[in-house]
Image (cartoon, helix red, strand yellow):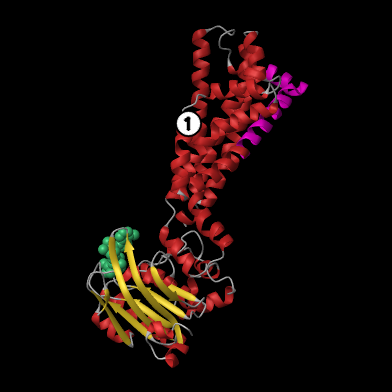
């Protein structure tokens, strides 16, 4: 690992790192949003990212996920990644089980079924997502994320627009799934409770341009 | 379906009323008066031959215009740089009268099949392109991001994420496409071919034979309605199935 020095972390820890992030600069046109953000996450470790609205949390996640590649710096990420957005982001024109098998071609119908069972919607495999309740759609989004045992899981405020009861239910489910599959997890949240409950470590963004504080 | 039938019967009654009031079979014959000449044209094989010629041309122009239009629309919708360059062309072609393109194609390519199909295709491409471009611009960026993070294979992405989003636009383009294309094909046949429904209409127009003009027009309209109801509409319903499930 030749980037050990630039990351400033002990070499031993880096061996286990699933993802290492080194963002020197990220800007949209003239607005400089992020600077000098460095951290790494180990297998099985859960890291929460917090910070005020508009600071650049989603921007950072999009860099980490590889959705946005226009930045200065380097990010090393594994091949097997999963993401859960604020919205379920499903394919409404494909069935519930196809929503898993199309995204993970290596899985057959039975494994997809098993993944759905895990989140409690095993009986909905042949419906279209539009026929599910909002809570069930989010469960499907979680099932899709965990189905292929990702090395890295990314969540962007996954429970933010839910009513408290549903949010609690989803949080419990996510907690259980993370404990079972143990991916490296990076998630953004506003909620201090949520951060404390799910994460081993909390990173806070602050300043302008934003960096870790 | 019942409303549709009743509405068509209403049209027929209107025709009968107009023919009765006009009382001149040379100008507007009764619907019944078309039957025996229709059978004669059908039995002699003349009607089927010209109908088939026109249908083949419609099919060719439709397939070519859809293929080119969908490709162009996708590219222009996805790449704003290409769009900026090609958009003015699109506006020019959209506003070019069908007649001008037909005449120019006949003059430049010659009075042959290629010229006809080229003219009709060029007439339709801008329209398909515009509709599909709207679809490509409206592609959901969140689904794209999702597909990217999960490393969805490219072919799967096109087939299961992009195409279903484009399908309503392609279906709309196809339906308006068929409707416009067959009309332009008739004009092009009228002007420069020696076969097809348009040619037959030209022939009987010169003889002032209203009965045969109506027979050829109505047969073709009937065929196109059949295509619309038995193929295009069911297909559109199928691609929309998930919405109504
Ligand atoms: N595509 C873009 N073009 C221009 N500016 C952008 C773009 N995306 C984000 N920004 C700007 O970058 C900054 C950070 O936005 P970001 O969405 O990352 O904030 P956030 O921390 O996720 O906020 P929230 O907690 O409200 O979701 C904001 O000032 C935003 O206006
Ligand atoms: Mg955000």
Q: Where is B202 relative to B83, above or below?
A: above
Q: Secondary structure at mark 1?
A: helix
Q: Where is A99 relative to B58, above or below?
A: below
Q: Nearer the viewer, residue B73 or B23?
A: B73
**In the image, residue A59 lies at what x, y percent?**
34, 67
**In the image, residue B90 lies at what x, y percent?**
48, 35
Q: Nearer the viewer, residue A21 or B51?
A: A21
Along the horizontal axis of the image, is B94 left or right of B120? left
Q: Is residue B14 magenta?
A: no
Q: Is residue B61 magenta?
A: yes
Q: Please indicate, yes or no, whether residue B209 appears anywhere in the rendered image.
A: no
Asked where in the image residue B134 lies, by quadrant, the reply is top left
Farthest residue to the right: give it. Answer: B44
Q: Nearer the viewer, residue B229 or A116?
A: A116
**In the image, residue B190 lies at what x, y percent?**
63, 18
The residue beneath circle 1 is B94
Q: Where is B92 relative to A94, above or below?
A: above
Farthest residue to the bottom: give it. Answer: A12
Q: Please indicate, yes or no, whether residue A6 appears anywhere in the rendered image.
A: yes
Report the predominant secondary structure element of the magenta stretch.
Answer: helix
Query: Within 8 Å of ligand 1, the CB of disc 1?
Result: no
The residue shown at (65%, 35%) is: B60
Q: Nearer the viewer, residue B210 or B64?
A: B64
**Quadrant placement of the C terminus of chain A:** bottom left
- Mark 1, Cα crowd under 10 Å, few <14 / some 14-19 / many 20+, is some
Along the horizontal axis of the image, is B6 left or right of B52? left
Q: Which residues are magenta?
A: B36-63
The residue shown at (40%, 64%) is: A70
């Amino acid at each position: 690992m030749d980037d050990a020095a630039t990351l400033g972390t002990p070499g031993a820890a880096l061996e286990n790192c699933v993802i290492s992030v080194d963002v020197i600069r990220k800007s949209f046109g003239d607005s400089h949003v992020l600077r000098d953000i460095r951290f790494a996450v180990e297998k099985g470790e859960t890291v929460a990212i917090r910070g005020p609205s508009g600071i650049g949390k989603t921007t950072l996640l999009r860099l980490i996920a590889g959705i946005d590649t226009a930045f200065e710096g380097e990010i090393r990420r594994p091949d097997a990644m999963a993401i859960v957005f604020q919205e379920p982001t499903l394919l409404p024109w494909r069935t519930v089980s196809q929503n898993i098998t199309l995204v993970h071609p290596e899985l057959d119908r039975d494994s997809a079924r098993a993944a759905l069972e895990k989140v409690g919607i095993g009986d909905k495999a042949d419906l279209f997502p539009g026929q599910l309740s909002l809570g069930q759609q989010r469960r499907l989004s979680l099932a899709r994320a965990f189905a292929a045992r990702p090395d890295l899981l990314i969540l962007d405020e996954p429970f933010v627009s839910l009513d408290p009861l549903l949010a609690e239910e989803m949080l419990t489910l996510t907690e259980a799934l993370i404990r079972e599959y143990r991916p490296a997890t990076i998630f953004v949240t506003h909620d201090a409770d949520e951060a404390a409950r799910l994460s081993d470590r909390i990173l806070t963004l602050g300043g302008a341009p934003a960096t870790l504080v | 379906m019942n409303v549709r039938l009743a509405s068509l019967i209403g049209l027929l009654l209107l025709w009968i009323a107009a023919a009765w009031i006009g009382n001149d079979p040379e100008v507007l014959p009764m619907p019944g008066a078309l039957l025996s000449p229709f059978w004669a044209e059908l039995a002699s094989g003349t009607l089927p031959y010209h109908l088939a010629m026109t249908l083949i041309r419609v099919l060719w122009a439709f397939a070519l215009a859809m293929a080119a239009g969908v490709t162009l629309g996708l590219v222009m919708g996805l790449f704003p740089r290409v769009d900026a360059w090609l958009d003015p062309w699109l506006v020019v072609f959209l506003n070019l009268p069908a007649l001008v393109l037909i005449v120019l194609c006949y003059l430049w390519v010659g009075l042959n099949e290629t010229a006809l199909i080229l003219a009709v295709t060029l007439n339709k491409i801008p329209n398909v392109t515009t509709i599909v471009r709207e679809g490509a611009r409206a592609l959901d960026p969140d689904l794209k991001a999702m597909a990217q993070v999960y490393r969805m294979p490219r072919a799967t992405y096109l087939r299961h994420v992009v195409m279903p989003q484009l399908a309503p636009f392609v279906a709309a383009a196809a339906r308006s496409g068929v409707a416009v294309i067959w009309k332009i094909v008739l004009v092009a046949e009228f002007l420069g071919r020696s076969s097809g429904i348009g040619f037959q209409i030209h022939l009987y127009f010169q003889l002032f034979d209203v009965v045969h003009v109506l027979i050829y027009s109505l047969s073709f309209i009937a065929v196109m309605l059949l295509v619309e109801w038995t193929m295009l509409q069911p297909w559109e319903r199928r691609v929309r199935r998930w919405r109504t499930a």
